[in-house]
Image (tube, rainbow, N blue to C red):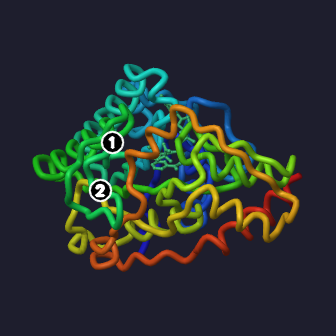
Amino acid sequence: MSNPKERILVIGACGQIGVELTLALRKIYGNTNVVASDLRNEHELLKGTGPYVSLDVMNKEMLHVLVIRHNITQVYLLAAILSATGEKNPGLAWHINMQSLINVLEIAKEEDLHKLYWPSSIAVFGANSPHQHTPQHTIIEPSTVYGISKFAGERWCEYYHKHFGVDVRSLRYPGLISYKSAPGGGTTDYAIEMCYEATENGHYKSYIAENTYLPMMYMPDAIRATIELMETDAKNISLHTSYNLNAVSFSPKEIAAEIKKHIPGFTISYDPDYRQEIANSWPQSIDDNLARKDWGWKPEYDLAAMTEDMLKNLKKKR
Ligand code: NAD
Ligand code: SER
């Protein structure tokens, strides 16, 4: 059960996940108990729903003051540079993804925070990992700076849990599909772009080849997974690196066919770019048995239900 006394800080609250997660947490814990923060201006959907603070998570002193001043007991750290953007500036991606996590882990240790959430990704896996039903524990040789930072981050989470008792929890999200807040530069964003372009122009040129399968998840499932993991009794959490999490796997050709059921005139062409190599190195599907066993994870949305809901909501937005 959620504790009404919790005071939550969401860092990176204006991003693709942050907006929806902040709104979901505010429903559970009460608007005033969830402080949203980001480098960017407050997202339109957050305005008027609760406290908002401008924050650069790289500034540890500023973060520390914020945690003390707002009596924060839990932090959700979502600020990061994603896979495709990260390859354009590897040094910056490493610096931001690592230092933000270390800053938050240190403050969680110093202030004895109740819980910390930090997401990892399917990007921890590499070309030598099994590509089908990729197991929780297997060869982990990421090839992108994003994947390397996520793998190192997982090790840091386990380290702070083991040595300092920080209750840090994590999920290896697949590619997340959503319509409320724009995605931030990932390889899997093609599927979101395709839905937008289908409703706006009836055509999409995909930077991922037609038969490339990747693990994906609709945002409502991802938000529910995050909250279920965070609300699970600590004694049931057997993993303090990051849980594999599965929902659906599809290729550009398959989601295009699904879109055509709703927009018959939709057309697609393919022009793979540097992101194809990233996609080729990632799993095609994920084995998430440990998440199912430890805290009862079960996805709800399949490709058909996800596409129908995405298109319905994108049409409403136009
Ligand atoms: P996003 O890029 O949409 O959002 C990140 C937010 O962090 C942005 O609003 C950005 O302004 C903010 N931010 C960046 N630098 C900051 C800083 N120095 N201080 C404060 N805020 C800063 O990313 P997202 O898709 O919402 O992803 C959130 C987390 O989930 C990331 O760790 C990402 O790696 C992980 N993840 C996302 C996906 C996905 O498909 N979206 C999949 C796997 C893992
Ligand atoms: N969706 C993310 C990306 O493509 C996976 O972590 O970067």
Which of 216/156 is in front? Answer: 216
Q: Which mark is residue 150?
A: 1
Tell me, yes or no, if residue 73 can be seen here: no
| Residue at point 49%, 41% (across, down) | 11
Q: Quadrant of the N terminus?
A: bottom left
| Residue at point 58%, 64% (across, down) | 218
Asked if ligand 1 lies within 8 A of label 1, the reply is yes
Q: Is residue 264 left or right of residue 294?
A: right
| Residue at point 28%, 79% (across, down) | 293
Task: Check disc 1 and give the amino acid type.
Answer: Lys
Crowding at dot 1, Cα within 10 Å, few <14 / some 14-19 / many 20+, comes out as: many
Label 2 with label 1: CB-CB less than 8 Å: yes
In the image, is residue 116 above or below residue 14? below
Residue 40 x, y percent position in the rendering: 62, 31
Find residue 303 and report its image quarter: bottom right
Asked if ligand 1 lies within 8 A of label 2, the reply is no
